[in-house]
Amino acid sequence: MAAQGIPTDVPARLDRLPWSAFHRLVVVALGITWILDGLEVTLAGSVAAALQTSPRLHLSAEQVGLTGSAYLAGAVLGALYFGHLTDRLGRKKLFNVTLGVYLLATAATAFSWNFESFLFFRFLTGAGIGGEYSAINSAIQELIPARLRGRTDLAINGSFWLGAAVGAIVSVPLLDPDLFDPDLGWRIAFGSGAVLGLVILYLRQFLPESPRWLMIHGREGEASRVVDEIEARVVASVGGPLPPFKSSLSLGMPHRLTLASVARTLLRAYPGRTALGIVLMASQAFVYNAIFFTYALVLTKFYGVAADRVGLHILPFALGNFLGPVLLGPLFDTLGRKLMIALTYSLAGILLAATGWLFSADLLSAATQTTLWSIVFFFASAAASAAYLTVGESFPLEVRALTIALFYAFGTLLGGVAGPWLFGVLIEGEGRSGIVWGYLLGAALMVVAALVELRLGVRAEGKSLEDVAPPLSSSIG
């Protein structure tokens, strides 16, 4: 019963830790998920034109858009399935399983023999990445000290674009017909993701289970021992004593996770945060997935960029997306979540509308289009990363992974799955007037999200996860 008040010092001990080699390992071994996703999405975008000319696949623009939607649909289902298992079975078990699924599926993509097989393997690759999102987001937030959680989470989510940059760089020689056969280069590109996944599987063996997950599942002794080990590693890394801590959290009986309890938590206990999470996730998902999955098609059709040169235009775009969360991230811990989320969403929307108008008026070249997209997504990338931060830290520990999965799923279904297909259809049409309406729709969604943030935003900067949303076991028996 909650009245028994079993005290725990696990959260306080984790939040007072100084930054150390252990935290850097967490960032690298777990944050690599976003690099893998960025690699996958960029390769899919970069090879879009090559897939259309491949003698084996020969996809249409609409089919290219459909494969992007299949990847996202797989990510949605993978997030839901693996997210539920992550809350039940633990963070560590699942972040190894989901990486394994990704690894096998992306390797299989390289051996696709027709449109249907390519579509299926992209779906499975997405399932692995979607499962990673729920397992990894929850684990990272539970291991990073509260005062650094915002900037760290944004930087990790922004590392998606390091993967995008790698994908853009490797796509240039791989898609060069003078170096590789047109049906071979794109296969090597997808196979490269599996090689990177093997390295990460090795690094993850040095990470422990989340002490917070152990704590809320009645394994306080084990959780305390894991924190002991983490503290020893931190002391060895920083070479000094740890700062003092003050614990005030008491837990009751472990909460039994059910769909009914999740629904009660989201709809009854935190309805405002639930509405906010859906709006933030859906708006950024539409903008990103619709534009990025079809960006190569825009370059090739409207600007005459050769298929093997697309990666050169995606590279500066990726750089702007990476720098946004990294440079703006500290402000989310100092100026606060509410102000910065509203600011980044609104600026991204306004700049997106302006860029869309210039595109429709045929006032841009491939270089200026890329430059403007880089500026737009400098802010949009920080906004999107903050959406993941918000849904991860705003709900109780017991349902964190599944909640992340649900918001990712709902947001992607509402704003992401149809986007690539819609833009593929618009690009197939005549002229620029059709596709610009898609850009304006994305801009409107981002501005609306900024207004919702101002109304419903959560001030979580510098607070322990347990202060932002008390564990269910601390208030119910």
Image (cartoon, rainbow, N blue to C red):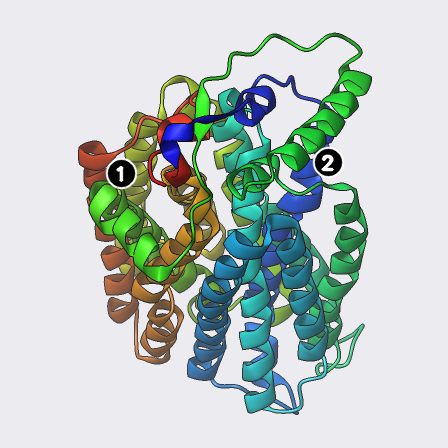
Mark 1, Cα crowd under 10 Å, few <14 / some 14-19 / many 20+, is many
Quadrant where the image shows the C terminus: top left
Q: Nearer the viewer, residue 194 or 296?
A: 194
Asked if marks 1 and 2 touch (Cβ < 8 Å), the reply is no
Residue appearing at x 24%, y 42% in the figure: 269
Distance, label 1 to label 2, CA atoms, is 34 Å
On screen, residue 392 versus residue 218, left or right, reads: left
Q: Nearer the viewer, residue 277 or 349?
A: 277
On screen, residue 262 versus residue 28, left or right, reads: left
The circle drawn on residue 25 is 2
- Residue 377 figure quarter: top left
On the image, the x and y values in percent for residue 409 come to 39, 62
Quadrant where the image shows the N terminus: top left
The kind of secondary structure element at disc 2 is helix
Residue type of the residue flagged with mark 2? Leu
Residue appearing at x 33%, y 42% in the figure: 348
Q: For the image shown, how many numbered marks are present on the structure?
A: 2
On screen, residue 412 versus residue 434, left or right, reads: right
The circle drawn on residue 346 is 1
Say whether disc 1 or disc 2 marks the residue closer to the N-terminus: 2
Residue type of the residue flagged with mark 1? Ser
Q: Is residue 472 visible?
A: yes
Residue appearing at x 36%, y 54% in the figure: 407
On the image, the x and y values in percent for residue 340 come to 34, 28
On the image, the x and y values in percent for residue 177 come to 73, 76
Q: Nearer the viewer, residue 454 or 291?
A: 454
Residue 371 against residue 467 in the figure, above or below: below
